[in-house]
Amino acid sequence: MNEDIEKFFLDKGCLIEEKAIEEIEKRGGLEYILKNEKKIDFSSPIFAISNLPSINEFSIIKEFHLDGFPGISDNFVDIFKSRYSFLHSKLNETSKNHFFTQISKLKKGNGPVFTSGIVSEYNESKRGYGIVEIEDDSTSIKVILPKSFKDIIIKDEVIGVSGQFSKDGTAIFAENVYRPEAWKETRESQTSLKVMIISDIHVGSKNFLEDSFLNMIDYVNSQGISFVIINGDLVDGIGVYPDQESDLAINDINLQYKKLAELTSKINSNVRVIIIPGNHDIVYPTEPQNPLPKEINTMFPSNVTSLSNPVWVEIGGRIFLLYHGTSIFDFLESIPGTTMNDTGKIMIEMLKRGHLAPEYGKNLSFIPLKSDYYLIDPVPDVLVTGHVHSHSITTYRGILAINASTFQEQTSYQRMMNFNPKPAIGTVVDTRDLSTVMVQF
Ligand SMILES: [Fe+2]
């Protein structure tokens, strides 16, 4: 097979590199070359992987776009209604033997009841029982959790419970707690594409690791990478926190993007680069966030595509859910004992709840929309976050969860917080089997 490809290229007057042969074999061998002959330029004496035609097409599954600027409103009723309705249905879809009923339709008396609702309150009794108040669109009820239940309850998440009514009918003594978990059946994709996943570049910061970023680009250009995902905080921005000026090497946000555009133009043009904004980018800070504005997008080469935060895309037969990850700090505050190095654990907590950011009213502020954009729907094969400047690769119920590394070394703020980031690590995902490779740059 190898010899056939080699001979074909020799007949065309060029020597082919070993890596290009490997890539052609992945795409279907000599047959692929014959089908795509017209698209291939045989003029260079040495044929490299970068001379192969682009196969890096991807599709957008779900993207956010808001016309204009988000208004100010405190009407979040629609978000919660859509959250309850979707996750209640999900609990019923995944449950084999029982049906979760609306709270107001439960029959009081002997016998088990199944219901679900949004957690509006959570307390612990002196005797160590968890007591939650759950509500749906009809009413609310108190639920006393079993003493054996040691899992974490987060405000505004949707849970299902089964149990018995108390004698006076004002509370349910729960026997089991159910969650609308996101999960995927393990399977192989027919397409093998390598996707480089990174985040939090912070161009413009004095701590931006430019040399490591350039090493990452060399790797992408030489190792058959088809996609690069940059998961937010593309630049350091201006005025994101008090006295930021003293940490900046470039103190004009347009020039920060210009510098990033110059750097990304060094990536081979047949590699598709997907960028989304984060909390440091030139988009409003509430979420979901629009893609970068047009005047910034036009600075970038044509192989760079700017999308919203969060966004769902399909690459090589796999759904990638890209979320910058601002809600991670809300999870950290609500889950005792977790640290910024527990991003894998926190991403599992998201998947368990079928939601990227259940808790309302903490660090993250939302745009009041008609529906809840943060439901994990559709369920991705790969969930990507960044934001924390840590790094983790975890698998949960068939879903690969990656907290992507940064290209900013420890800042003075992180030093003060005693946090050691894990910078300059690329995570390469193969879409065929979701295997990963970590590369330190
Ligand atoms: Fe960041």
Image (cartoon, grey):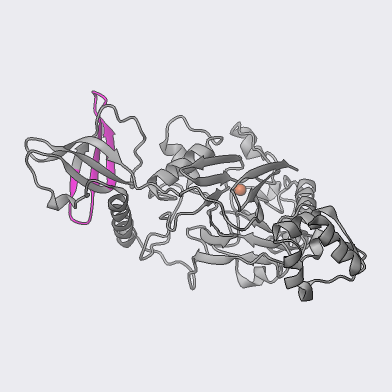
Question: In the shown orientation, is residue 415 left or right of residue 286?
Answer: right
List x then y, in percent, for residue 307.
57, 64
Q: Which residues are magenta?
A: 118-141
In-front residue for pair 347/21: 21
In-front residue for pair 409/130: 130
List x then y, in percent, for residue 5.
82, 61
Per the image, is 282 magenta? no
Per the image, is 126 magenta? yes
> Overall secondary structure of the magenta stretch?
strand
Residue, far bottom? 38
List x then y, in percent, for residue 29.
74, 61
Asked whether residue 62 appears in the rendered view, the answer is: yes
In-front residue for pair 115/44: 44
Q: Residue at x 6, y 37 (%)?
A: 168
Asked whether residue 199 appears in the rendered view, the answer is: no
| Number of numbered discs visible in the structure rendering | 0
Question: In the shown orientation, is residue 38 left or right of residue 348?
Answer: right
Q: Is residue 28 above or below residue 174?
A: below
Q: Quadrant of the C terminus?
A: top right
Q: Quadrant of the N terminus?
A: bottom right
In-front residue for pair 245/22: 22
